[in-house]
Image: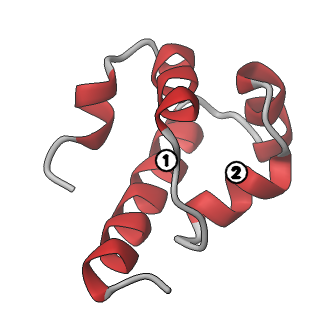
Amino acid sequence: MMDAMSIEINRQFGERLRKLRKQHNWTQVYFAEVVRIDRSYISDMENGKKAVCLPTLQKIAKAFGISMAQLVIRL
């Protein structure tokens, strides 16, 4: 069971992920193909339902052309 802080971080990360994806005009399906993860996992991350692991975080940052630090700064 997640604590309140973890839930809030997941929610904030999900908002950031959705914003970046939309800035690139990528659908969840296309983004899933780029990072090679399941589309439903992207949906769950964007909705704050799933946490992201470091290897996936690295794939996401690389897809957007930013560092992992830039992806999670001020969450």
Give residue 49's position: percent from left, percent from top.
60, 73
In this figure, which residue is indicated by the disc labeled 1?
17
Give residue 58's position: percent from left, percent from top.
48, 23
In the image, farthest residue toward the left: 74
Q: Residue at x 13, y 50 (%)?
A: 74
Disc 2 element: helix
In this figure, which residue is indicated by the disc labeled 2?
42
Disc 1 element: helix
- Tell me, what colour scheme is on the image? secondary structure
Task: Classify residue 35 by image quadrant.
Answer: top right
Which tag, 2 or 1, sits closer to the chain's start? 1
**Which amino acid type is shown beneath numbered disc 2?**
Ile
Give residue 22's position: percent from left, percent from top.
57, 43
Q: Residue at x 84, y 43 (%)?
A: 38
- Residue 4 falls left or right of residue 15: left
**Which amino acid type is shown beneath numbered disc 1?**
Leu
Task: Classify residue 25 by image quadrant.
Answer: top right
Residue 54 lies, with reference to residue 13, above or below; the image says: above
Give residue 39's position: percent from left, percent from top.
83, 48
